[in-house]
Image (spheres, rainbow, N blue to C red):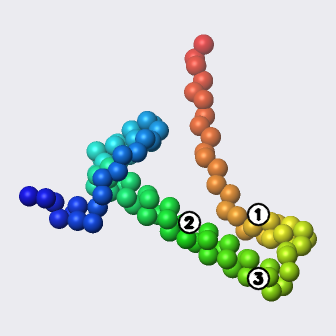
Amino acid sequence: MYDERMKGKRRLSASVDADLLKAIEKLVRKGRAETLSAWVNAALKEALENEAKMQALDEFFADYEREHGAFTKEELDGVRHEIEKRAIKVRAARRRKKRSAA
């Protein structure tokens, strides 16, 4: 019997980087993702949601500039400065090299 989870789904053939596929398969084996298809579906959904947000921002700024004029260099520099000031800096911890007993 056809799996009910497949209702509304369509098959897809896509080429992906081998290292990405290997990483997703590892997540599935560990139980971190239900299936490869489910992981890909979730990733595509997230990408589309992000694209919609970016489109909304583009429209917002275009409307703003139509009403108030283009942003000045000083305004853009000020925004960059605020973003950098508020950004959370994340750096990977450095691993110490083991010293060999020579």
**Label 3: few (<14), some or many (≥20) within 10 Å?**
few
Quadrant where the C terminus sits is: top right
Q: Position of residue 42 (x, y in %)?
A: 39, 60
Q: Position of residue 49 (x, y in %)?
A: 50, 68
**Residue type marked 3:** Tyr
**Left of 12 or right of it: where is 62?**
right
The residue that label 2 is drawn on is 51
Spot the residue most to the top: 102
Q: Secondary structure at mark 3?
A: helix
Cα distance in 3D space between marks 1 and 3: 23 Å
**Label 2: few (<14), some or many (≥20) within 10 Å?**
few
Residue 33 in sight from this viewpoint: no
The numbered disc on residue 64 is: 3
Residue 16 in sight from this viewpoint: yes
Q: Residue at x 58, y 19 (%)?
A: 100
Mark 2 or mark 3, earlier in chain: 2
The residue that label 1 is drawn on is 84
**Residue type marked 1:** Glu
Q: In the rendered structure, are the residues bearing label 1 and label 3 in contact, judged by CB atoms less than 8 Å apart?
A: no
